[in-house]
Every structure is written in C-alpha cells, then in structure tokens.
Image (spheres, rainbow, N blue to C red):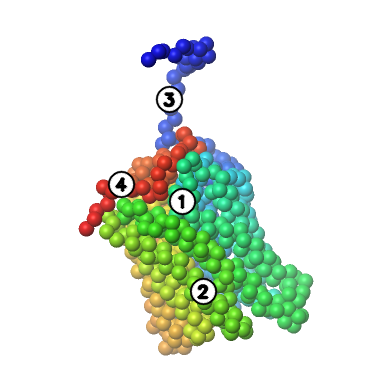
Amino acid sequence: MTPTKQTPLDTKAKRDLEAAPLVEAPDPGRLNYLNADYGWKSWLFTTDHKRIAILYLVSISVMFFIGGLMAVGIRLELITPPGDLVQSETYNKMFTMHGIVMVFFFLIPSIPAVLGNFLIPIMIGAKDLAFPRLNLASWYIYMVGGAITMGAMIHGGVDTGWTFYTPYSTAFSNSNVMLAGVGIFIAGFSSILTGFNFIVTIHKMRAPGLTWFRMPLFVWAHYATSIIQVLGTPVVAVTILMVAVERAFHLGLFDPTRGGDPVLFQHLFWFYSHPAVYIMILPSMGVISELVTCFSRKRIFGYEVIAMSSMAIAVVGFLVWGHHMFVSGQSTYAGMVFSALSFLVAIPSAIKVFNWTATLFRGSISYDAPMIYAGGFIGLFTIGGLTGLFLAAMGLDVHVHDTYFVVAHFHYIMVGGAIMGYLGGLHFWWPKITGRMYNETWARAAAVIVFTGFHLTFFPQFILGYLGMPRRYHGYPEEFQVLNVMSSAGASILGLGYLIPAVYLAWSMRYGKKAPNNPWAAQGLEWQTASPPSTANFDTPPVVPDEAYHYAASEVIVV
C-alpha cells in the first residue's frame, strides 16, 4: 500500500494537537441537564426540553394534589345519605373544581407535557424540539392559565360542573365562571403550542435512518395526539370564550331567552371534549406499547397496525361527539349515526389491547413495577372501553345518562387508564430522567394498591348508576349508602397508592442508587444516552439502522 503524502495542513493540525493541553473529557454523570447550570434563573429561562419537562412535572403534580383534595371532600360528603358535611352550593363547587383541575390542568398535559417533552427529541435523535422558546412559552402560558383558574377557586369557586353547560353558566350561575373560563382559554394555547411543536419536530428532526415505520409507538401516539390538540383545542377555547362574552355583554349566543341555542354549546363543547378523551388516553397507550414490548422481550405484535390505529382514533374521534347528546333533543337519525360511529371508534382501541396481549403471549415477561402498571392499565382500560359501548347504545344511554354509571366509566378510562399509563411511564423512564433508581419493592406494592383501590372506588359506582343514583347530588336515598361507603373507603386506599410513589420517588432523587444508562435492557435511542442525559442529548448524531424494538431472538423464552 502506497503511503499517502502528508499535506502542510495535516502537519500543522498534528502540531497543534500535540501542543494542546490535556483536558479531561466531561463525565456525563457530572455534566448533564440537571447540573449544567446553577441557580433558579437557569431553570426559569431555560430552553432545554428536558428542564421544561421537569417544570411541567412539578406544576401538574401540584394541580393533581389540588384536584385530589376536592375529590376527598366529595367522597367524605357521600359517606352519609343526607348532605350534612357541606351545603349543596359548596358541594357543587367541589366537584366542579375537581373536574376542571383534573381535566384541563392534569390529565390533558400530563404525559405530553412531561414525558413527551422529555423523550420525543431523544427518541428521534434530535437535540431539542423544533421551537425551544415556544416550548418554554407554552409552560408559562400553562402557569398563567392555572393561576387565573386557581384565582377563581379562591374567590368563591365555580358551580357549573366542568362542562360549563348553558344557559346555567351564562345566565343563572353566580359563581366565577368568567374567571375560570379565561384561565381555561389561556391554558388551551399551551396545549396548541405543544402539539404544534411536536408535529414539526417529528416531521423535520428525525435522525438518519429513522423512517416513519421505525419510530417508537410512543412517538406515533404523540403525533396523533398533537393533531387533536392543534385541531380541537381552538374549538373549546372559543366556546368557553363565548360563554364569558355572553355573561359579560348579555348576548344571545346560548341563552334561549335572548334567542340563543343552549344545544349549540353542547355541540361545540363535545366536538372538542370527546376527542380530548383521546388527548388524555392516546399518550398512555403509547407508554403501554413501550412497556409491553420491553418487559416481554419481544418486538411488539402488529407494529404497523398499532401505529395506524392511533391515527384512526385521532380521525374518527372527531366524529362521535353526538353520543353525549342522546337526551338533548337531537333527531333519532342523528343519534343512530353517532351511535354507529361510537362503536366504530372502539375498534382501533380494541386492536391495541389484542396486540398487546399477543405480544405478551410466550414472551419472557418480567414483572417489574412499570410492567405491573401496564397490566393494570390493560385491565382497567378494557373495562372502561366495554362500558363505553353501553353509553354508545341509545337505549341504554337514556337509562344511565347523568348517573354514576357515567362517572365510573369516565374514571375507568381517565384515572384507570391515563394515570396508570402516566405512572407506568414515569417509573420506566425515572432512571433516565433523574439518574437514580427507586425502591422496586415499594413501587410494586404501590402499583397493586392503586389497582385495588381503584376497583373498590369506582366499580360500586357502576351499580349505583344502573340503579338510578344521579351524579352531582350531595344527598341520596339510604339504600345507596353501603355502596357509597365502599366507594369512599376505596378512595382512601387509592389515595394512599398515589401518595406512596410521591414519597419514594422524591427519596430516590437524593438517596437512590445511581442508574445505569439502560437499566431495563430496552431498545430505543433514549437508552443509548447517559442517565441523566447530557444537555445536548447525544455526543454524536445518532443513526438508526434497525426497526423499532429490535430484540434478539435469544432474549425470548418460548414455552
């Protein structure tokens, strides 16, 4: 082999390299997004997607605590048949603020704003989201909206229910509807900006080799969710603004005494608010896809079908809002169409459940805490989905409409589904987020306690609703007391299950063992970074040569 002639530039570069002082390479364990800068200003003015995710984590945890306190008051009131703990007006404000805080300020932003913000750039091999400053602005907008809504609660609360149904909210309620409406309107822009940022990032910033059908299903779920956020959130924001405008200027938008149409409000509200259910549940489905394939050591069954089912849910979810309005006076023919479409949207969700089950079949399953949460999600979401078919059938819906059957169904999807997925994902990626391991024994116990407490809380409410107990009443007949006491007792167990992770996760940040880069032996770009990741995520730009979830055949135990 003929030696290559050295150019003057090569010689100069060599001399400069030899003359350069020796500098120790930065240790990823010491130099990362958590300790790269010091001081509170470096956090409040950061554009690092990982730090913004932590800011969201702290914010929504506070909101979860506030919403949980309202739930405690509701269950304490319902222990006894007469309304003897608080007055009816106070009770109305408690369940309203519970719904507003949990839906708009916890469930909708929880996984996208925390796990999505933290993980999506790393999962696709990017250094950050497409618009880092817009990402920070979305958190500030969320905080402003939350502060205004909390102001409404402090100054007397809201008594309309989280749905703000007219004409009560526009003409009769004496509570702070306008202030809460403004807060929700502002917070909606946070959701829109986050969704827009995710869409652009996923389209434009994927690593070389990361084709659409090599993306993690977590990213697919957030892509579908972002479409709903961008297209649907403006509708509910404008609707809530119209309620505030009607109250302020006495316009005839929804008030029938001024020529308005209260049913129009329901159409506008549910056009967004039913797809909002999928904003809450689709990210959890993405989490479960990651957990099931990792802890069964198998490539997920039907990857392409699961990815497309997320998109199908996002599209069909916009067409089913009318099943909330079977008793509103809409025509029977419209009800039949919405009923059929509501059954149709259940198919993509069922596909996911069947594919997760097929993935687990003959897999080498390990029952770590994230996998227990995933199993709990599948069980609770299945019950919630099947009972949703009851509400999609017009005859049954007329019978159980506005009863505790609806409350139980909604919570099996939103609490049993969304929060189980959120906790499963938080435990799965906690070592990556913090660089610390939590106590696995406590984590497994907490997952079982949450699952048990949830069933004790909400399953009796299916029976209560079918027997005819209406929701949003602080008094009820004595024959319903046993089931209500059981529900309140279950709520105390459920609350304990939520409190335990808050304790041991906070403890782990200081005293937990240092986490390896990939404690679960999982696939994905996020597990190829340090724990916690460096500020730039990757030292060198990554390349993706393989399909998603490329687990070796030797890792699978076939029975």
Q: Which residue is mark 2?
A: 342
Of callouts 2 and 4, which one flags the residue occurring earlier in the amino acid sequence? 2
The one nearer the camera, 219 or 351, is 351
Q: Which residue is mark 4?
A: 552
Of callouts 4 and 1, which one flags the residue occurring earlier in the amino acid sequence? 1
Cα separation between marks 2 and 4: 40 Å
Cα separation between marks 3 and 2: 61 Å
CA neighbours of label 4 inside 10 A, class few (<14), some (14 to 19), many (20+): few
CA neighbours of label 2 inside 10 A, class few (<14), some (14 to 19), many (20+): many
Of callouts 4 and 3, which one flags the residue occurring earlier in the amino acid sequence? 3
The amino acid at mark 1 is: Phe
Cα separation between marks 1 and 2: 28 Å
The one nearer the camera, 202 or 86, is 202
Q: Secondary structure at mark 1?
A: helix
Q: Nearer the viewer, mark 3 or mark 2?
A: 2
The amino acid at mark 2 is: Ser
The amino acid at mark 3 is: Glu
Q: Secondary structure at mark 2?
A: helix
Q: Secondary structure at mark 4?
A: loop
**Residue at the front extreme, as displayed:** 1
Which mark is on residue 26?
none
Query: What is the quadrant of the N terminus in the image?
Result: top left
Q: Which residue is mark 3?
A: 24
Residue 22: name its quadrant.
top left
Cα separation between marks 4 and 3: 36 Å
Q: Residue at x 57, y 52 (%)?
A: 199
Q: Nearer the viewer, mark 3 or mark 1?
A: 1
CA neighbours of label 1 inside 10 A, class few (<14), some (14 to 19), many (20+): few
